[in-house]
Amino acid sequence: MKRLTKVLLLSLVAAFVISACGSAPLSIKLDDFNIKLDEVANTSGKIFYPKEAAKFSKSGINVKTIKLTGNMMYTADAGTSSLNMAFYARLDNPEGSCTDAGMAWVCDKSDKDVAISDAKEYEKDVKTPISFGDKNPEVLADGVNQGQIWIGVEVSGFSGAAGVEFKFTDMIAQVTIF
């Protein structure tokens, strides 16, 4: 009976630990990446999305939420010294509902565009902390679960910049499953 009580108690403790870990975020370091654009214009009320979605291999594990944190720095050959940007996510392909701008889709804001960050001013040549998924982390998770997502940006409040590069470094994905 003592042995059965011990086994039962250990089983309950193990079940509690496993269930607690299932809802705790897992941290995954991502590779640094850059996005280069010939120029960026004032896109107030419009969101620029890349032509191709970010693609993910479906793992069969249901991701509940994702939050991405790290640093972003933008550089430009010419133009303004700061950019006011907000980032969005979209699960549906922009083709057909947005304007083809060559290397990107230009979309009027709609219910398909979900904010994943607040608007924030970024200074040129300054490494700045960035966070995606503070707002609406479930849309990032839905994108991973379906195998693709479009991440876009709205830039507002300036006349333009040429030779723009966005450098994302030290990115960490905090993933919650179940």
Image (cartoon, rainbow, N blue to C red):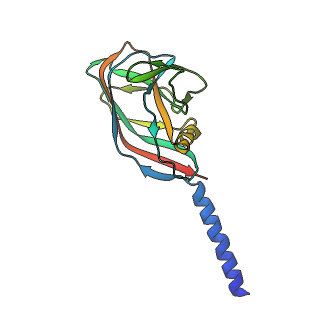
Residue at 50 percent of width and 36 percent of height: 149
Q: Is residue 87 above or below residue 176?
A: above
In the image as oriented, which residue stretches furthest toward the right? 1
In the image as oriented, which residue stretches furthest toward the front? 96
Q: Position of residue 9 (x, y in %)?
A: 68, 76
Quadrant of image for the N terminus: bottom right
Residue at 40 percent of width and 43 percent of height: 171
Residue 99 placement, left or right of 122: right
Residue 105 placement, left or right of 62: left
- Report which quarter residue 15 is drawn in: bottom right
Q: Position of residue 79 (x, y in %)?
A: 30, 16
Q: Is residue 63 above or below residue 156?
A: below
User: How many labels sit on residues?
Assistant: 0
Q: Is residue 4 above or below residue 134?
A: below
- Report which quarter residue 38 is drawn in: top left
In the image as oriented, which residue stretches furthest toward the top? 159
Residue at 38 percent of width and 20 percent of height: 102
Q: Position of residue 129 (x, y in %)?
A: 41, 37
Q: Is residue 20 above or below residue 117?
A: below
Residue at 58 percent of width and 27 percent of height: 112
